[in-house]
Image (cartoon, grey):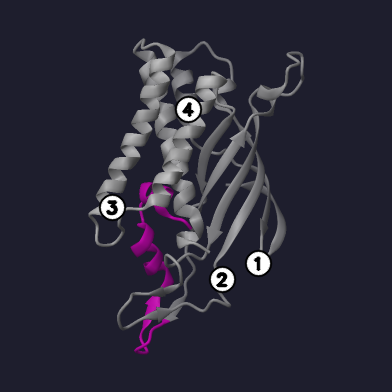
Amino acid sequence: MGDWAHMDKAGHAFSAYTESSIAYSYIRWTGLEDSKAILTSALVGTGVQLTFEIMDGFSNDWGFSVPDVAFNTLGVGVFYFQQKYWKEQRFIFKSSNSFAAYPDYSVLGSDGSYADLGSRGAELYGTGLGARYLKDYNTMNIWLSINPAAFLTNENSRMPKWLNIAFGYGAENLYGGVENNWPTKDPVYFLDTSLFPRYSQYYLSLDVDFTRIKTNSGFLKAAFKVLNIFKVPAPTLEYNAVNGFRFIPLYW
């Protein structure tokens, strides 16, 4: 399994897509013609993410990542292709976060001392809602939300135009990039993998494309654009290799 169970890569695609999509709305609002607005928006998404990659390249902790750039390009490309050739977004990258609490569990160190698992989570991902929403790979999910009605040629179809089907990805028990032990020098803390196995999660759920809800209100249109970043809570089917399938009546 790759670093952070590929959650960071999914996050890069989501961020690049979202930045391009939001930039497009504002750029079109200025009156710039559509083709130029699409290209400019793609350059905005690429530029913002590339700035972070360059900063990481000068960091001792991270370093420049070609795979990160590839997933940034994927996110921008998903926006660009749809807006240029379909004039709408039928596939939308979204995110959600449960903000689940970390378990009260002490991890034994190589020198006999103990570290609190919650403190390790806070060290990696932060404690504020904003930090956890953007960084907590244990509680966040990245979704690809698809609008079936956009592919139907029958305008009299009874399928709600705002109803989406969402495919999600998440991961559990990530307390290190590749393995659950930290730091790299004594004392080193080793998390019991039998109690806290690292695994990926796959989801199938319903969602709402707020931008397809008809309204004449400029305020609501702007609000719906922002809300469309987030996956709405809905009945969800989850699969993971540890627990198999489970149905969640209302998944956040």
Q: Around disc 1, counting alpha carbons within 10 Å, would you say few (fewer than 14), some (14 to 19), or many (20 or more)?
A: few
- Sequence order check, earlier mark of 1 and 3: 3
Q: Dot 1 corresponds to which residue?
A: 242
Q: Which residues are magenta?
A: 108-137
Is 152 located above or below residue 144 in the figure? Answer: above
Marks 2/3: CA–CA distance:
29 Å
Q: Identify the amino acid type marked 1.
A: Val
The disc placed on residue 80 is 4
**Residues marked 2 and 4 touching at CB (< 8 Å):** no
Which of disc 4 and disc 3 is earlier in sequence? 3
Query: Measured from the top left, where is residue 210 in percent x and y?
Result: 56, 26
Disc 4 residue crowd, few under 14, some 14–19, many 20+, Cα 10 Å: many
Q: Residue at x 38, y 82 (%)?
A: 114
Q: Nearer the viewer, residue 31 or 66?
A: 66
Nearer mark to the viewer, of 1 and 3: 3
| Residue 100 shows up from this direction | no
Marks 4/1: CA–CA distance: 37 Å
What's the CA distance linking mark 1 and mark 3?
34 Å
Q: Secondary structure at mark 3?
A: helix
Q: CA distance from mark 2 to mark 4?
A: 38 Å
Query: Which numbered dot is residue 56?
Result: 3
Mark 4 or mark 1: whose residue is earlier in sequence: 4
Q: Which residue is mark 2?
A: 197
Q: Amino acid at mark 3?
A: Asp
- Indicate which disc, 1 or 2, sits on the residue closer to the N terminus: 2
Cα distance, mark 1 to mark 2?
8 Å
Position above or below: 218 against 199 = above
Name the amino acid, label 4.
Tyr
Residue 38 relative to residue 57: left or right: right
